[in-house]
Image: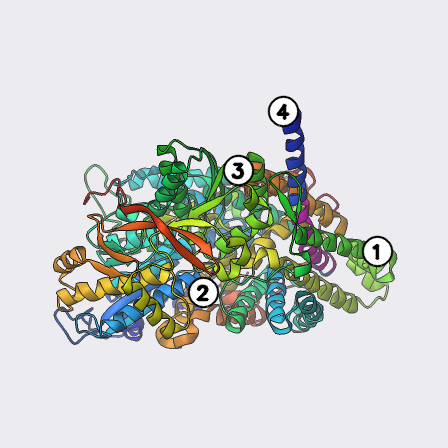
């Protein structure tokens, strides 16, 4: 049922109750068993704001994967309903609800910001809609709020953070300061680092936060300079990552205090960061220069499709597309056969540019976390930090 | 010996934080001074003032892309901002002079929405950065771990220069005299036969230019992104209210107070960081309901 | 203020009847949207009491909206329902107490300073909510089960049912309107209007002006808390933005565009602005341009201010004459 028909029904409804007899037929919401109807994908991603570049890459790569799969899902055509979530948790519930109840999408896909994703998880749970998360690492989605209809093809905030903590502790560093934005993803990231670092004998002396998405770091950078830790762990992404790395360098801290972080600190941002990012080490489930054939072919295809270099966000969007293509092929496009579709998706081994991976019982990727070092405009692969790392999925009833 | 050294180091850190606070405060002053003039002289609550700041930043970005040099871009940007300011005054703000504050709030709120969308249509929604001009792209070492970016020092110097210029104009010129009189008692100025309309136009254009200029010089360090006007708008209002409506002196003092409160708040009391600014405003108002230098 | 003409009265009653009958033919999405509009109508009417009748322009009214919403969140256990009959009065009380405390301080200022200091208090609550982990921080917090309306085993209605919720919202909106009408017709109401017209005179006549203003402030705050409670209950989500100045600002828009001092005007304003936003951002109608719906919205607001200075309600009452000029404070 299109929006126009829905609106006409609303006006008709009012006329009817004002005394004008009008037979308002209630059209079927969607064809229960109709292979001719299109599958409706609801995309809720940031197309504006600090995470806009990430949202765009996910969107383009998702469509690339579907095009490579034949342009259809289980031999059915696709239509898209798109919403810009602006990375604002305050509007998230309404936006997601609109996609599900007004636009009546079959599958909900999104998003980047963890706070927004948390709202989508709730809406998906309330309406029993299938949700695939192509980035947001909010732990709860594959933790306490995990469910058969919630999938993630990216990471949990904990994964790369824990890996970096382990690496730093293994190097003999003992005192660290963690800094991030004051929201769920920030806290989970610094928490993961803390867990890995302190398990290896280190101590996180101080955790510094500022409100999302502010980028005035001066006061906190001065604070770091006075605390003089052995290493600083920072989680920022998008525009914020650009600003932080540049400001950290301008404050002269790079010379005496090493800066580390999850790969988001340097992914998709190296052009803007320039000199200030050189030599930075980060951990992520993706890197440049991986010796994987699928990666080489994906990067070439992405570049020729949209004239931009691929990054981890594109890879995640691409894998989301691959997961959907595989899942719906297994059920012949019958998106209503939920149990069969979920089972198919759970069993899929995704041939990802990052390396093949499977999903844990909580529906989160089990994957290698790589160590990377910035050289020029690339996050060069520098070894494996932790192999086949699975998120502990604490609180998940399915795990 | 170690104790002395750490006390010295603490002293240094303290001074650096003061520098941070003052730098932020001075930039805030540029924006708030325009707001207080428009408010005090013309009696208009201008919610769109933050949008002028954003406009300046985006102008700096676009013009720098065009001509390749930030200084040249700023040189071109200022007259452009003045022109836009005069156009807005002619089309819109002229109708607000005698109107209820409520309608000014409403109209300028509508203007914010329009300016945000125009920005989106003309320049897009991406976050942009502007490179710091090569001449100032270095840092001055202050302690064994910390350096201070030279460009930020330059920004502070520029803001101080503008403040001095404003003080000069307001205290020593006829225009300044009229402005001070107008802030004090608008009706009287009109009755004395002075063309208040011209004064209004000058004041408005100056206010817009100041906010835009602030956006331009801050762009290399603050980034250029959608919605960047909102944050500074609300803090500027706080400055104006603390300082007293119409008072440049008050705006200066208020800006510095806010800059320091915000900076030290983040570091000393992170639990109430963000709230400090508003707590300060509430405290000042409850003590001096018209602001520090305002007339009740 | 002009009295509504019989025609206007009839039209408004018909609209009310239409609202009451809508769920029979309604679409799920619009059912929820209309319920939300009615909740905001309550919120807007409470602000009209302050702005239109008491002459107190508050830019921080969202503070009480947020207090009502967060109270529900705090009273809701993780995966069970809290009782409606306990949590609703609690939320309204918390909002009222907040209004009492804040009002006692802010009502000492006036004019533009009053506007700013009300904003300051709302912003303080906003930052407090952002910083507080207990309240969920900047991501907000969720209410997983709606409040239960059961009394001693009998459940008169189920808030989880969209139609029931719609009727509860409608009933409360009508109730709030009726309450405010009664209050405004009473002696209290007349004193408030008198204070707005000429505060000095009322003081000279011996009325404790401060107490009356405070009472109005508290009543408005309580109703705003009710609206906040309902909004939190409907979507099961609270967020620091509930306290934010943009929330207060857009509410003020609804009140002004709807027509200050008419009481039914803000209801019209809530419907008009929300439906306009829904219409302008509809992709099916505007295709690529729908993303930029704020542009026509902004233009609409400006035109409305210039052409309909009394708002929709004022226009309905007495035509498009320009608003009287009000002297500066």
Residue C177 visible to the viewer: no
User: Label for residue B270?
Assistant: 3
Q: Which residues are magenta?
A: B22-41
Q: Residues within 10 Å of mark 2 (few under 14, many from 20)?
A: many
Let me know if residue C251 is in the magenta part: no
Labels 1 & 4 near each other (Cβ < 8 A): no
Percent coordinates x, y for residue A304 in the rendering = 37, 74
Give whichever of C197, C300 is nearer the camera.
C300
Q: Read off the residue under disc 2.
A: C273
Q: Read off the residue under disc 4.
A: B2
Labels 3 & 1 near each other (Cβ < 8 A): no
- Mark pair 1, 4: CA separation: 48 Å
Percent coordinates x, y for residue C119 in the rendering = 56, 48
User: Label for residue B168?
Assistant: 1
Image position of B15 (left or right of A319):
right
Image position of B288 (left or right of C57):
right
Q: Residues within 10 Å of mark 4 (few under 14, many from 20)?
A: few
- Mark pair 3, 1: CA separation: 39 Å
- Mark pair 1, 2: CA separation: 47 Å
Q: Chain of mark 2?
A: C
Let me know if residue B32 is in the magenta part: yes
């Amino acid at each position: 049922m299109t929006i126009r028909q829905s609106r006409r029904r609303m006006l008709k409804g009012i006329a009817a109750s004002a005394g004008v007899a009008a037979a308002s037929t209630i059209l079927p919401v969607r064809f229960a068993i109709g292979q001719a109807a299109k599958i409706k994908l609801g995309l809720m991603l940031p197309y504006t704001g600090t995470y806009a570049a990430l949202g765009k890459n996910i969107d383009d790569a998702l469509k690339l994967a579907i095009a490579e799969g034949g342009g259809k899902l289980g031999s059915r055509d696709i239509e898209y309903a798109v919403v810009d979530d602006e990375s604002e948790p305050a509007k998230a519930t309404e936006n997601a609800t609109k996609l599900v109840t007004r636009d009546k999408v079959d599958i909900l896909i999104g998003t980047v910001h963890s706070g927004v994703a948390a709202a989508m998880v709730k809406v998906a749970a309330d309406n029993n809609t299938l949700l695939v998360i192509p980035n947001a690492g909010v732990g709860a989605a594959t933790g306490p709020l995990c469910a058969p209809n919630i999938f993630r093809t990216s990471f949990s905030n904990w994964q790369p953070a824990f890996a970096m903590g382990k690496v730093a502790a293994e190097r003999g560093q003992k005192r660290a300061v963690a800094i991030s934005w004051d929201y769920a993803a920030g806290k989970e990231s610094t928490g993961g680092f803390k867990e890995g670092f302190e398990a290896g004998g280190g101590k996180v002396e101080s955790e510094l936060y500022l409100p999302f998405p502010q980028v005035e770091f001066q006061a906190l950078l001065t604070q770091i300079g006075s605390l003089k830790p052995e290493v600083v762990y920072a989680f920022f992404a998008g525009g914020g990552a650009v600003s932080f790395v540049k400001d950290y360098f301008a404050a002269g801290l790079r010379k005496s205090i090493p800066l580390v972080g999850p790969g988001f600190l340097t992914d998709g941002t190296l052009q803007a960061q320039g000199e200030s990012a050189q030599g930075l080490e980060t951990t992520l489930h993706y890197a440049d220069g991986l010796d994987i054939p699928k990666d080489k072919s994906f990067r070439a295809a992405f570049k020729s499709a949209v004239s931009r270099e691929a990054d981890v966000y594109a890879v995640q969007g691409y894998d989301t597309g691959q997961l959907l293509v595989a899942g719906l092929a297994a059920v012949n496009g019958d998106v209503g056969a939920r149990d069969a579709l979920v089972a198919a998706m759970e069993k899929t081994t995704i041939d990802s540019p990052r390396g093949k991976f499977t999903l844990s019982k909580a529906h989160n990727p089990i994957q290698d976390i790589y160590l990377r070092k910035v050289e020029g405009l690339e996050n060069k692969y520098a070894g494996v930090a932790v192999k086949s790392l699975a998120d502990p999925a604490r609180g998940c009833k399915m795990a | 010996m170690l104790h002395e050294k750490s006390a010295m180091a603490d002293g240094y850190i303290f001074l650096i934080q003061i520098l941070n606070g003052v730098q932020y405060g001075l930039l805030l002053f540029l924006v708030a001074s325009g707001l207080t003039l428009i408010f005090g002289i013309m009696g208009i609550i201008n919610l769109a003032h933050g949008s002028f700041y954003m406009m300046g930043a985006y102008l700096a970005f676009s013009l720098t892309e065009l001509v390749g040099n930030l200084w040249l871009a700023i040189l071109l940007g200022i007259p452009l901002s003045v022109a836009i300011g005069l156009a807005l005054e002619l089309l819109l703000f002229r109708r607000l002079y005698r109107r209820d504050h409520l309608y000014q709030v409403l109209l300028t709120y509508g203007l914010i929405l329009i300016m945000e969308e125009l920005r989106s249509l003309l320049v897009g929604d991406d976050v942009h950065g502007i490179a710091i001009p090569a001449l100032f792209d270095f840092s001055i070492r202050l302690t064994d771990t910390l350096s201070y970016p030279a460009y930020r020092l330059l920004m502070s110097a520029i803001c101080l220069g503008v403040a001095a210029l404003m003080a000069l104009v307001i205290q020593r010129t006829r225009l300044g005299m009229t402005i001070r009189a107008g802030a004090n008692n608008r009706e009287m100025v009109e009755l004395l036969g002075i063309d208040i309309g011209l004064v209004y136009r000058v004041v408005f254009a100056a206010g817009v230019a100041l906010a835009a200029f602030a956006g331009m010089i801050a762009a290399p360090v603050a980034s250029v992104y959608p919605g960047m006007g909102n944050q500074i708008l609300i803090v500027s209002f706080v400055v104006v209210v603390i300082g007293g409506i119409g008072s440049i002196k008050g705006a200066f003092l208020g800006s510095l107070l806010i800059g320091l409160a915000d900076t030290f708040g983040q570091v000393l009391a992170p639990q109430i960081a963000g709230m400090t600014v508003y707590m300060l405003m509430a405290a000042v108002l409850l003590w001096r309901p018209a602001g520090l230098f305002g007339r009740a | 203020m002009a009295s509504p003409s019989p025609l206007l009265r009839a039209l408004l009653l018909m609209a009310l009847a239409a609202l009451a009958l809508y769920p029979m033919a309604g679409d799920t999405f619009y059912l929820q949207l209309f319920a939300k509009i009615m909740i905001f109508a309550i919120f807007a009417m409470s602000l009209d009491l302050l702005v239109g009748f008491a002459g107190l322009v508050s830019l921080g009214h969202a503070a009480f909206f947020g207090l009502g919403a967060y109270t529900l969140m705090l009273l809701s256990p993780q995966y069970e329902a809290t009782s409606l009959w306990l949590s609703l009065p609690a939320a309204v009380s918390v909002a009222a107490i907040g209004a009492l405390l804040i009002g006692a301080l802010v009502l000492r200022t006036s004019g533009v300073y009053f506007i700013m200091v009300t904003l300051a208090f709302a912003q303080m609550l906003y930052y407090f909510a952002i910083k507080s982990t207990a309240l969920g921080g900047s991501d907000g917090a969720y209410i997983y089960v709606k409040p239960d309306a059961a009394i001693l085993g009998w459940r008169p209605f189920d808030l989880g049912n969209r139609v029931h919720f719609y009727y509860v919202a409608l009933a409360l909106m009508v109730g709030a309107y009726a309450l405010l009408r009664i209050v405004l017709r009473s002696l209290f109401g007349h004193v408030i209007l008198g204070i707005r017209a000429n505060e000095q005179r009322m003081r000279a006549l011996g009325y404790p002006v401060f107490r009356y203003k405070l009472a109005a402030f508290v009543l408005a705050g309580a109703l705003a808390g009710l609206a906040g409670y309902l909004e939190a209950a409907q979507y099961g989500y609270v967020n620091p933005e509930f306290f934010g100045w943009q929330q207060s600002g857009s509410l003020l828009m609804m009140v002004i565009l709807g027509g200050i001092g008419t009481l039914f005007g803000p209801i019209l304003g809530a419907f008009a602005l929300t439906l306009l936003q829904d219409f302008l951002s509809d992709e099916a109608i505007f295709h690529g341009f729908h993303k930029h719906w704020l542009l026509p919205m902004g233009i609409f607001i400006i035109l409305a201010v210039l052409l309909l200075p009394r708002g929709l309600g004022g226009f309905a009452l007495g035509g498009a004459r320009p608003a009287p000029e009000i002297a500066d404070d």
